[in-house]
Image (cartoon, helix red, strand yellow):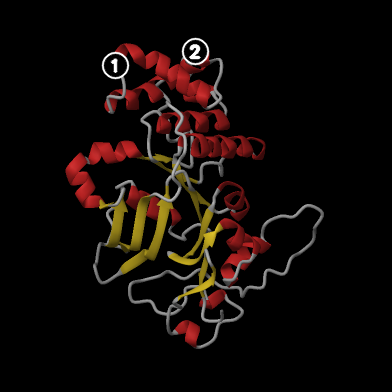
């Protein structure tokens, strides 16, 4: 893989506008739907990382699966390289789009086939996408293994997934994703199932791919601390809604939405111990429906009033690259 130089980070690779995804509840009765993603919009630029942060059920992974065409969107617009996604696929085909938008899954063991060697996992996408002649495949596999720090490469290639550690398996998944020279990698909780001691190594590997090869990352995580470390932009999601977004430093150093403040208050700090005041009401996370109204965080928010239960707040600009949805800003 050749290193890209002079990456133009102003170039928008993937643009999402007003994305909506509904799932049927029970026996596919259309009048009984759950809204997993509601009115989500963002731009992903060349060589940039966008962190999507939120707890389980916030719609983070659903959005990624829509972008990889695992799920169909209910409403909204998606553009890839400046063209409507449907037009791009009609022009270049599903396989070409799949080559350019790859995904790294949360479970590095579950995403690898236990009956095949590491060599097979990395060689297969090279063959499917016709990235090289058959005789050149072995050297490319070894090059990719070395790139992700799995050495000695020949010995590693002959192993099976169960013979590797969790961190090593995730490096294999990354090597498989970058084998086809993608423009975008959707990393769905790529470090959450790994030991703390190896998480930083995986984040640094992805940062190296981003900075040296111009790959754009959508980094899905529940850990806002790693979002701040890895991503230039951060979007905080709650119950399918983007509640705060912008430059990572702005969002994490000066959080304005009560939910963002709650996430930051839960991050452990060296030298601090004891019970923390989370400044939140006790309550269940709501199940959002197409007919639901109000702010999704109203039932847990200490600032909530009548208006918060009646309408979803419009975006408020906090700074040049900092927005939030809250009636009390």
Where, by quadrant of the figure, is residue 141 drawn? Answer: top left
Q: Which residue is mark 2?
A: 154
Q: Residue 51: x percent and y percent?
A: 51, 52
Camera-near label (2 vs 1) is 1
Q: Tag 2, which secondary structure?
A: helix
Find residue 227 and report its horizontal and vertical position in percent: 57, 51
Rendering quarter of residue 182: top left
Q: Quadrant of the N terminus?
A: top left
Q: Quadrant of residue 133?
A: top left
In the structure shown, which secondary structural element does the residue marked by tag 1 occupy? loop
Which residue is farthest left? 90
Residue on which disc 1 sits:
133
- Would you place residue 113 above or below residue 10 in this image? above
Asked whether residue 160 appears in the rendered view, the answer is no
Residue located 23% across and 41% down the image? 94
Distance of mark 2 from mark 1, alpha carbons? 19 Å
The picture places residue 200, in percent across and down from the top left corner, at: 63, 39
Q: Residue furthest toward the front?
A: 6
Which residue occupies 36% across, 30% down?
Answer: 180
Residue 36, numbered label: none
Q: Up-down: is 92 above or below 32?
A: above
Q: Quadrant of the C terminus?
A: bottom right
Position above or below: 256 against 266? below
For image coordinates 67% across by 57% down, the residue present is 267
Q: Which is nearer the eye, 8 or 235? A: 8
Q: Nearer the viewer, residue 86 or 59?
A: 86
Report if the CB atoms under discs 2 and 1 are less than 8 Å apart: no
Question: For mark 1, does the 10 Å Cα neighbourhood hold few (<14), some (14 to 19), or many (20 or more) residues?
Answer: few
The answer to whether one can see residue 287 in this image is yes
Give the mark nearer the N terminus: 2 vs 1. 1
């Amino acid at each position: 893989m050749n290193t890209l130089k002079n990456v133009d980070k102003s170039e928008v690779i993937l643009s999402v506008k007003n994305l909506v995804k509904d799932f049927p509840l029970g026996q596919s009765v259309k009048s009984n739907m759950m809204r997993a993603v509601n009115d989500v919009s963002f731009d992903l630029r060349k060589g940039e990382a966008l962190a999507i942060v939120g707890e389980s059920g916030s719609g983070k992974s659903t959005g990624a699966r829509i972008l990889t065409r695992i799920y169909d969107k209910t409403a909204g617009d998606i553009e890839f390289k400046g063209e409507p996604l449907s037009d791009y696929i009609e022009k270049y085909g599903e396989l070409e789009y799949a080559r350019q938008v790859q995904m790294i899954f949360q479970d590095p063991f579950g995403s690898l086939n236990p009956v095949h060697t590491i060599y097979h996992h990395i060689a297969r996408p090279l063959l499917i996408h016709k990235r090289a002649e058959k005789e050149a495949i072995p050297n490319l596999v070894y090059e990719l293994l070395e790139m992700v720090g799995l050495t000695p490469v020949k010995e590693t290639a002959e192993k099976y997934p169960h013979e590797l550690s969790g961190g090593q398996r995730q490096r294999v998944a990354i090597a498989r994703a970058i084998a086809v020279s993608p423009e975008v990698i959707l990393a769905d909780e790529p470090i959450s199932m790994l030991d703390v001691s190896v998480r930083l190594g995986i984040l640094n590997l992805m940062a190296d791919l981003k900075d040296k090869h111009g790959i754009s990352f959508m980094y899905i995580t529940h850990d806002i601390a790693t979002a701040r470390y890895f991503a230039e932009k951060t979007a905080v999601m709650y119950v399918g809604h983007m509640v705060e977004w912008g430059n990572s430093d702005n969002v994490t150093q000066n959080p304005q939405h009560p939910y963002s403040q709650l996430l930051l208050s839960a991050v452990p700090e060296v030298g601090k111990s004891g019970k923390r005041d989370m400044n939140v009401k006790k309550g269940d996370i709501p199940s959002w429906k197409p007919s639901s109204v109000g702010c999704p965080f109203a039932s847990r928010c200490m600032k909530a009033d009548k208006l918060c239960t009646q309408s979803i707040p419009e975006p408020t600009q906090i700074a040049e690259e900092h927005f939030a949805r809250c009636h009390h800003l």
